Image: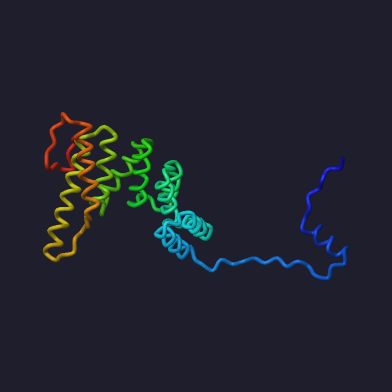
Amino acid sequence: MMARLPVSAASILLLFLIAGCSRIPKIIVLEDPLTAAEHVDLGVAYERKGELDLARREYGMALRKDGRFFQARVNLGNLSLAGKDYGKAREEYLRALETRPGDAEATNNLAWAAILSGEGIDEALARMEAVAAAPGGRQATLLDTLGVLRMRAGRPGAAEEAFSLAEEICGKADAASKEGAQAVSTCPEEVRREIAGHRQELRKRYPSRPYSNRVDMGSTAR
């Protein structure tokens, strides 16, 4: 039995010529008119409509345009996180952080991949500590995530510090809003509920530990 040889494009063309075909098939290469940013915007629009597969496709197309497009990586990670594919989410966030080391959004979301999977807590905590200590890191949502990481790492006192400061920032945002000033860090009701829920979880995990209402983030509580 004769082995089959691979058929090349030149072989196909030769067959057309031998057969006397006057028309040669034309190969059409379609150009993608959208930029990477436009693909991301389209992906976000699909996400809002609940069309997640189409959103994922658009983020992938954005990365084919620009393999270092940060937001496309983060958004792919978010889709994987929502789908409970924590390993894939972690991979996307880490690749995003290669583009923007120390970015608060990617670090925060990487932390939640660790929290929800129970894997990589120590690494995520180290990254989150650095974000919280950096300029702009004193945000309620970031401090709440830091508190959860500290709690999962067995540091209840330090977790309480983070939750306490997060709630204090929310209080200051409320005061600034009532005075008509621009709040430094907004604190929507959803964030407040999450902080309260995490503090309640902390007390259930460590019921015998005394908790104060205000702790300095610079202390060495464990």
Given the current orientation, which residue lies at the most extreme bottom position? 22
Judging depth in this view, the residue of 146 and 80 nearest the camera is 80
Is residue 16 positioned above or below 219 on the image? below
The C terminus sits in image quarter: top left
Judging depth in this view, the residue of 15 and 185 nearest the camera is 15
Judging depth in this view, the residue of 216 and 171 nearest the camera is 171
Q: Position of residue 218 (x, y in %)?
A: 18, 42
Q: Position of residue 26 (x, y in %)?
A: 73, 68
Q: Is residue 83 left or right of residue 19?
A: left
Q: Is residue 23 left or right of residue 75?
A: right
Q: Residue at x 42, y 50 (%)?
A: 79
Q: Is residue 219 left or right of residue 8?
A: left
Q: Is residue 46 left or right of residue 217?
A: right
Give the mark count. Answer: 0
Q: Residue at x 21, y 53 (%)?
A: 189
The N terminus sits in image quarter: top right
Given the current orientation, which residue lies at the most extreme top position? 208
Q: Residue at x 32, y 40 (%)?
A: 126
Q: Position of residue 120 (x, y in %)?
A: 38, 37
Its colouring scheme is rainbow
Q: Quadrant of residue 174?
A: bottom left
Q: Quadrant of residue 208?
A: top left
Given the current orientation, which residue lies at the most extreme front position? 50
Q: Position of residue 195 (x, y in %)?
A: 22, 46
